[in-house]
Amino acid sequence: MNLELSEEQEAVRRLAEDFVAREVTPHAAAWDRAEEVDRGIVKKLGAVGFLGLTIPEEYGGSGGDHLAYCLVTEELGRGDSSVRGIVSVSLGLVAKTIASWGTEEQKREWLPRLASGEALGCFGLTEPGTGSDAGNLATRAVRDGDAYVVDGGKMFITNGTWADVVLLFARTNDTPGHKGVSAFLVPTDTPGLTRRPVHGKLGLRGQATAELVLEGVRVPAAAMLGPEGKGFAVAMSALAKGRMSVAAGCVGIAQAALDAAVRYAGEREQFGKPIASYQLVQELLSDIAVDVDAARLLTWRVADLIDRGKDFATAASKAKLYASEAAVRAANNALQVFGGYGYIDEYPVGKLVRDARVMTLYEGTSQIQKLIIGRALTGSRPSEYAPRVAEYADGCGAGHIRPMLCGMSDTPVKQQNTAAYYTQAVLSFGIAIAAVGIGIFQLDAGAWVRAFLAISVLYLTTSAFTLAKVVRDRQEAGQIVSRVDQARLEKLLAEHDPFQKL
Ligand SMILES: Cc1cc2nc3c(=O)[nH]c(=O)nc-3n(C[C@H](O)[C@H](O)[C@H](O)COP(=O)(O)OP(=O)(O)OC[C@H]3O[C@@H](n4cnc5c(N)ncnc54)[C@H](O)[C@@H]3O)c2cc1C
């Protein structure tokens, strides 16, 4: 295992570091006070390629792997979380989702503009009444000819007042819960869509957060992203990767806290010595340093898993959970090192504390991440929920081949497989008993032969039935675990994980 960055990755990291030093850090405090990042930053982010990372070049993206994306996100987070959020949402939640789910026409329409910064995207899932429970959203899209008419409202939408397109989630049928939800790409200048800025945030003050009100918004049916009724799967696949981006941003916050605290501890003198010489201050610094390293490694692991086409969703939840809590701790520890000066906005650590705080809330609160991780460990979930992908794949075939070892499981596939096995076993056993009975009572060679033939025919029939099922399940399992079909894996993961919430 090699944790060293490749030359290319190091070059991307340095590019981001220089960009942040030049375009972000010098303005971060002023943008925070003004409650608005300079909008010109969007074009600059696009020009340097940061809004097109991992998007294929044929759609105007700048390519690159997910580790490069993490390195850029970390640097932006180190400079200003408000700027980092612009990229995490427009690229991470919107452009990448269009790249995974969009039709050719949708990709051609939106990706080049989003990747260049000519257009900005926002992600409209949360509503005033539904946050963690996003699958129960109430915004409705009713079919009317070749269009849908959307009514409802969205809350806390990052980039909301700036965005040119909203990836909007709305209910298209009466099926309760996440199954009735569809996704749409809605230009924000569509009549009936109103945006209201959300002011007074504790942190991320420079970021354009908005409430969206939708009244009779007419959206062409061709603007639906992904199949009808699969909008929640679209949202969950976006968020699974989005959590890596949030985690990387948190590493940036923690690194900024460490840099500032180490520098200040070396400069500030008390009792005739730099405070850095006191071991209790060193303890604060070392706690931050360990948090930085641990959060970074957890985040890089997610990028590595994605780039190698592996299942990454639980790892992303672990990284997001740890990194967001670590960022809050790190910023708070740094403020302690600064003493009273940390409490005024002349110094950067107060802003770090405020900006870090939201990280444990959005893209799934810490409690929701714990539920996801706990469920991955135990498999326990409400019974109507489908199995997680690995278990699903494992259940296919294994249920036939090793039913006694697998035993009955809470996963529908294993249940079906185990049931098929027992059906076959019971039938065969019954036939065997019948055959022996015939043999005992008739005691002639012809009866034995007839019984043997009857057993064989019936056993082969049930075996053929079971075998056909094994083959079908294995094909399905093969599709699910196919490492080349990452998009399908993500879709299935999302479909089967309705409990992962924003
Ligand atoms: C600055 C900011 C930017 C945002 N940007 C976006 C955006 O761009 N797009 C978007 O769609 N949304 C966005 N959000 C919304 C964000 O994702 C939600 O705030 C978040 O999902 C939590 O939802 P909620 O605020 O409704 O809290 P609730 O869901 O009401 O949760 C309240 C508390 O209850 C806990 N809780 C809820 N359910 C459970 C449970 N089952 N078990 C245990 N505890 C539980 C939560 O962990 C939390 O502590 C943003 C929010 C903020 C603050």
Image: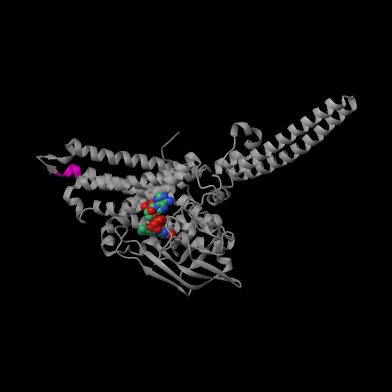
Residue placed furthest toward the front: 441
Given residues 409 and 500, the one toward you in this image is 409
Please count the marks in the image: 0
x and y, in percent, of residue 384 in the image: 55, 49
Whether 353 is drawn above or below 308: the answer is: below
Q: Is residue 451 visible?
A: yes
x and y, in percent, of residue 459 in the image: 77, 34
Given residues 86 and 191, the one toward you in this image is 191
x and y, in percent, of residue 200 in the image: 29, 63
Whether 231 is drawn above or below 218: the answer is: above
Relative horizontal placement of residue 267, taking residue 485 as reference (left or right): left
On-image quarter of the C terminus: bottom left
Whether 150 is drawn above or below 279: the answer is: below
Q: Is residue 12 visible?
A: no
Relative horizontal placement of residue 246, taking residue 478 as reference (left or right): left
x and y, in percent, of residue 191 in the image: 48, 75
User: Magenta stretch mostly in which secondary structure?
Assistant: helix
Q: Quadrant of ligand 1?
A: bottom left
Color theme of the render: one colour
Given residues 270 and 454, the one toward you in this image is 454
> Residue 436 sits in which quadrant?
top right
In magenta segment, residue 202? no
Whether 190 is drawn above or below 229: the answer is: below
Q: Residue at point 17% right, 37% down?
A: 278
Relative horizontal placement of residue 25, taking residue 86 as reference (left or right): left
Q: Which residues are magenta?
A: 264-268
